[in-house]
Structures are given as C-alpha cells and as structure tokens.
Image (cartoon, rainbow, N blue to C red):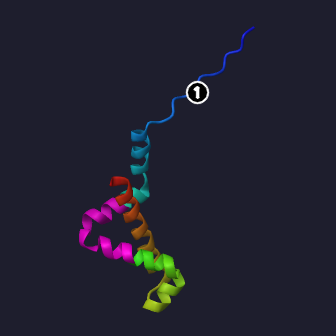
Amino acid sequence: MARTSPKRPAPPSRDDFLESLMDTSLYSMGAYFSDQHPELVDDVIDQSADIEERGLRGYAADNGLAVEECFETLLTGLAVRYYKAVAG
C-alpha cells in the first residue's frame, strides 16, 4: 500500500506577512502617536534611544523623572519606530 504524505499548507505570502505585522498593538500605538503628534515623533525616538542606552533607572535619575514615565516614553518610541519600519 503506497503512503502519501499530507499536503503542507502554502507558506504565507510577503503581503500576508506584512499585513500581520500591522495587526499588532505596538503598530497601532505607533500609528496613533505619529498621527496625533507628528511634531514629537523625532523627539520621542531620540529620547527612547537615550533611555535604551542609559537604562530606565539611569535615565530617570539623570532627568528627575519617574521610572514609569521613562518606561512609557521608551515604549512609545519603540512603537513609533516599529510603525515607521513596517509602514515604510
């Protein structure tokens, strides 16, 4: 009796993959911030890069900010960079 292998589903196309990247909270957050505050996009990206480099506690202490506030800025900056990377 001959055995047949089960059919594998076709891999998703690049368009499907890119659409799936857009269907995330991070993408939505970045899109919302970019649409609502286009004048702040570069600033939040720069600040988030500084926070990444120096760490949450270090950046907060150096700037007299709460760690939670720095985390929100970091997350917003990451979301905006993600949005810009996916949306092109």
The x, y position of residue 55, in whole percent, is 53, 80
Circle 1: residue type: Arg
Left or right, 78 with respect to 37, comes to right
Judging by the rendered image, the residue that carries numbered circle 1 is 8
Q: Quadrant of residue 6?
A: top right
The image quadrant where one finds the N terminus is: top right
Residue 24 x %, y %: 43, 53
Residue 43 within the segment the image draws in magenta: yes
How many marks do you count on the picture? 1
Task: Kindly give the residue lying farthest to the right in the view shown.
Answer: 1
Taking the spot 38% from the left edge, 58% from the top edge, the residue there is 85
Question: Of helix, strand and loop, which mostly describes the magenta segment?
Answer: helix
Question: What range of the chain is rendered magenta?
Answer: 30-46
Residue 19 higher or lower than 8, as above or below: below
Q: Quick one: SS at disc 1?
A: loop
> Is the residue 60 above or below the residue 87 in the image?
below
Instruction: Tell me what residue is drawn at x 44 percent, y 87 percent.
Output: 65
The residue located at (26%, 62%) in the rendering is 35
40 left or right of 76?
A: left
Q: Residue at x 39, y 78 (%)?
A: 47
- Image location (x, y in percent) of residue 4: 67, 16
The answer to which image quadrant residue 46 occupies is: bottom left
Q: Is residue 37 above or below residue 63?
A: above
The verdict on residue 1 being magenta is no
**Label 1 neighbourhood size at 10 Å, few (<14), some (14-19), many (20+)?**
few
